[in-house]
Amino acid sequence: MGNSPDLLLLIGGPQGGGIESAGQIALKTLILKGYSVIGTRDYKSNIMGAHSYYTIRARFDRPGAIRFPVDAAVALDAESILTHFGDVKPGGILVYDKGSLHTKIDAIQPMEQALKERLKKLFAEKGLPPVAESAIKLAEEKGVRLIPLPMRQLVRKLAEITGASLTSVARAVNTIGLTAMLYLMGIEPRCVEKAIATHFAAKKKVVAINVEAAKLAVDYVEENFGAPNEFLPDGPHRGKKVMLATGNEVVAMGKITGGLTFQSYYPITPASDEAIYMEKFRYHQLTSEAEAKLGTPKLGTVIVQTEDELSAIIMAIGAASAGARAATSTSGPGFALMNEAISLAIMAEVPIVITIWQRGGPSTGLPTKEGQQDLLHALFSGHGDNPKIVLASGDHVEAFYDAIKLLNWAEKYQTPAIHLLDKYLASTTTVLYRDEIDPGKAIIERGWRVENPTTEKRYMITDTGISPFIPIGGDTMIITGLEHTEEGFPTEDPVLRDEMVEKRRRKFETIAKEIPAEEKVVLHGDPDAKVTLVSWGSTKPIILESLKILEEKGVKANFLQIRLFYPFPAKEVLDVLSRAETVINIEQNDLLQAAFLIKGFTGYDIKHHIKKTNGRAFWDTEIANAVLEILETGKKEVVVKGGA
């Protein structure tokens, strides 16, 4: 969109120090200004004290990716100065607490030792001491505009103005730093103040303190650094009603809209926030259409926190067997503990949805960082022949509607259905417009259900492989992990065994035929482009941004987004790849798991790969640069390291 500013902002400080609130206020401020925004938080796996930061991008049209360097940053403590002084572009703004300049690197307990050593080596090479002030000097040499704020002095003044205690106003230090940065970037104070009132709407005293903090910041900036020459133009969305939501929240909304009646979970990052958000709607009322199709008017969603992940999936299996729309949510380590029960659900043909929020692994790995390492795990989880539906969402809007579709598919086809997401989507907040998330578009399909069977059998052998679903109590039957007869009774008869194996196979042949082509793969861009980028999941909006950068550099490329991984859409994938001169696979795992599946299902061996494994999301710029490097050099693999 023409004449659109493209703002990249960062807010850094101690975890538990209100960085999330500062980020949310910044997003709301920019929305009130009329901009589209995305924001993502990066945090460590401890509870308090360690470094946390929030990165924001804003422009007239929705940004698809966070990138570095940023236009402006707020560093609320010494660790933030030392971590991010190099992330601000020349000519950018760095707002910081000048009271932390003399903090020694070794005195910062939560900071990673490896980072400390890198910084000490860098400063020694420049003849500088190992303190935060050295980072400020290097930033100044690079051309960064420095805005030191006397935070302690300003907080004491805020306490005097408001009549509140120092303790109660201390957290407003975030608002002081944030307002100073936004004001110098050309954002009017009225937008910040309105955002504060919106964010803390239920806490009038907190609103009053933070509004005074914002005014104090503006006064100090004007007196010591001058006012901005002009304010940024208003964006095209000013005055429109929009929604801010994380990936966790939109999936929860999708499940509730789709008629979910039971969700179990055991707390694990980054999945927990989904269930916690859903608990706010424990007694929600369904739409009349959903009530009619579910047959249970005014039904709420039961949310159960279990003692472990195996219990979570077993409870979901039990609820689904009784006729509830059931799901469970977890991450890689928790999903590993569900494997035995996944096999049970496959054998017993129980319709459950399993939402997997991937993170960096293996083992506990990087509990709060990004990764796409559970694709093969999702497909091959469970022992024995273990087919199940596996669908990967690429953005917030897809995630909302996919949550509904998977509930439908699980029940229609009586199978476990896996929703594959990741930490980047989980903790990234984006602006969503009315026409993008519409509960009225939700369609609830429950498949072939028989409440009072006559001749129907629970595991009736059919041409489609799909049997009637009969809830527990509807007929005499057994739900078992053993091979079984049409009634569900255990059997080891070889003829019946073959018939049941073939029935379950036919079911997935039916699924492959009935799931629409647009749900399997999506080709973005010119179908005749000579360069095809292949990827999946949350890389989608980032790659779409990279296509724009490539086009500006004279390279026309398209993007094949694989959404359905099982049943795998081999023909659709091969049709696209076989037309391209150069195919480049892009993934956030080391083993190139999607490329492995593509070769296995289609025989196509992708020769060029871009991957990122450091726990940080891709940047659009590094993908574009890596593509150019491959095209220029023919390199087989490029590992990008942004955020290191």
Image: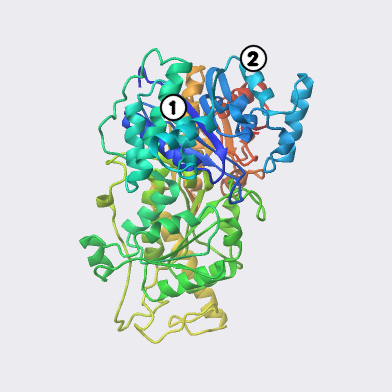
**Foreground of the two, 471 or 126:** 126
**Residue type at mark 1?**
Ala
Residue 611 shown left or right of residue 414 in the figure: right
Residue appearing at x 62%, y 37% in the figure: 611
Q: Which residue is mark 1?
A: 217
Element at badge 2? helix
**Foreground of the two, 640 or 79:** 79
The image's colouring method is rainbow
Q: Which disc number belongs to residue 555?
A: none
Q: Position of residue 470 (x, y in %)?
A: 36, 77
Q: Position of residue 561 (x, y in %)?
A: 48, 40
**Foreground of the two, 43 or 605:** 43
- Residue 470 can be seen in this image: yes
Residue closest to the far top: 229
Residue closest to the far left: 288
Q: Position of residue 354 (x, y in %)?
A: 48, 60
Label 2, residues with CA under 10 Å away: few <14, some 14-19, many ≥20: few
Name the mark nearer the viewer: 1 or 2: 1
**Mark-to-mark CA distance, 1 and 2:** 26 Å
**Residue type at mark 2?**
Glu
Which tag, 1 or 2, sits closer to the chain's start?
2
Across the whole image, how many numbered discs are drawn on residues?
Answer: 2
Quadrant in the picture for the N terminus: top left
- Residue 575 can be seen in this image: no
Residue appearing at x 66%, y 19% in the figure: 138
Element at badge 1? helix
Q: Which residue is mark 2?
A: 141
Residue closest to the far bottom: 476
